[in-house]
Image: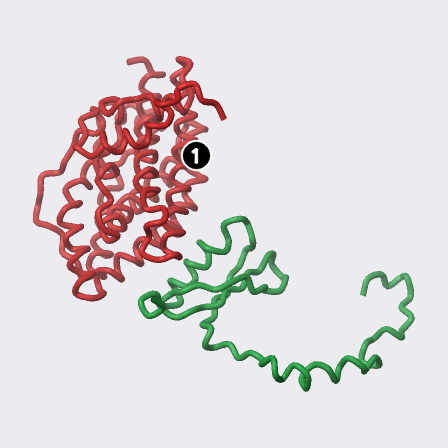
Chain colours: A red, B green
Amino acid sequence: MTSQEILFTYTLRLADNALVLGQRLSEWTGHGPFLEEDLALTNIALDTFGTATSLLEYAAKVEDKGRDADAIAYRRNEREFCNILLVEQANGDYAKTILRQVFVDAFNILLYTELSKSKDETLAGIAQKAIKEVTYHYRHTSSWVIRFGDGTEESHNKIQDALNELWRFTGEMFEMDEIEETLAKQGIAIDAKAFQAKWEKQIDELLTKATLKKPETVFMQTGGRKGLHTEHLGFMLSEMQTLPRMLPDAKW
Amino acid sequence: MSDSQGPIWEVFVQKKSGQPFVHCGSLHAFDKEMALQNARDLYTRRNEGMALWVVPSAAITASSPEDMGSFFEPANDKVYRHPTFYQIPDAIGHM
């Protein structure tokens, strides 16, 4: 792989995580539990799409093969997506969506803080803008996790179920393959392993406050970076990509 | 419906530091932390301001329309309360 291809792949991974998560969150539009929360979550979705757009545009530029951000977002099939499996999971109930989000938010704060020091100026700039957004996201989602966990019996059960189901997808966030190791050595990519302990400690404290119990040691699901996705991504993409594929020459 | 959404809070936005807080709407929330976050999400999407106050509606005491006459009309014909009879030298500028 050329260094250009390596940088493209890394940027695409970051972009796909934001793109798929943004799409999932926007599925809640109009369906939130009540008005204020509907707006809060869709605001988070918009922030996420904003980051995705910047990353996709940069990926298109780095790739330099004539694709624009739209082509990269809408004309790829499942196997070409390299997001982590956590973000493509079905939304489930609100507890599950919020719990998935808090895992990602806590990770993103660490990710973007480190990435803002990247030797790649564009990635650093994108990260700097994202830090303020994800700080707010985490504040919102973490307070909901505590409300659900330490709330009624029903809310506690729902979020404990969500935790039992989603925990197996959290390990993948910290994987580092050759591409990421190479870029990390050059000071361009972040070293996720270096802050994994910090993330675990923060989440442990949060889960304790929420009176929730992590599942026992479990096999961490993996495969996203290689394009090996769960059964959910295909359905989500067919909905997300239907319009551009139906009307490929449409311009606006 | 309002039982399951919490009490109503009134939201005030301050456009810029030093300026007055202006009422901009209301929302439902269960506690002050949630009220503040909801206010940020609902009322500051388009750069409306830099600071927020949220106040439980129950804490607000409002004048009633029946009182409007006795509260406010007497001030209408008391011109001498307005400081408009002074000559302000130009050098002072805006007062």
Q: Chain letter for mark 1, please.
A: A
For the view shown, which residue lies furthest in the bottom direction? B70
- Mark 1, residues whose alpha carbon is within 10 Å: few (<14), some, or many (≥20)? some
Which residue is depicted at the point 46% across and 34% down? A125
Q: Is residue B82 visible?
A: yes
Q: Which residue is mark 1?
A: A126
- Look at the image and tell me in which quarter the C terminus of chain B lies: bottom right
Which residue is nearer to you in this view: A115 or A221? Answer: A221
- Residue B23 in the figure: left or right of residue A178: right
Q: Is residue B47 above or below residue A188?
A: below
Q: Is label 1 in a helix, a strand or a loop?
A: helix
Percent position of residue A39, x then y? 40, 51
Q: Is residue A127 above or below residue A56?
A: below
Percent position of residue A77, x then y? 26, 22
Which residue is depicted at the point 20% across and 66% down? A152
Percent position of residue A147, x then y? 27, 62
Which residue is nearer to you in this view: B7 or A14? Answer: B7
- Look at the image and tell me in which quarter the N terminus of chain B lies: bottom left
Q: Picture quarter containing residue A124? A: top left
Which residue is depicted at the point 38% across and 41% down? A113
Which residue is depicted at the point 42% across and 14% down? A66
Q: Picture quarter containing residue A160? A: bottom left
Q: Picture quarter containing residue B22? A: bottom right
Residue type for callout 1: Ile
Q: Is residue A116 visible?
A: no
* Count of residue discs: 1
Which residue is nearer to you in this view: B2 or A2? Answer: B2
Percent position of residue A163, x then y? 17, 50
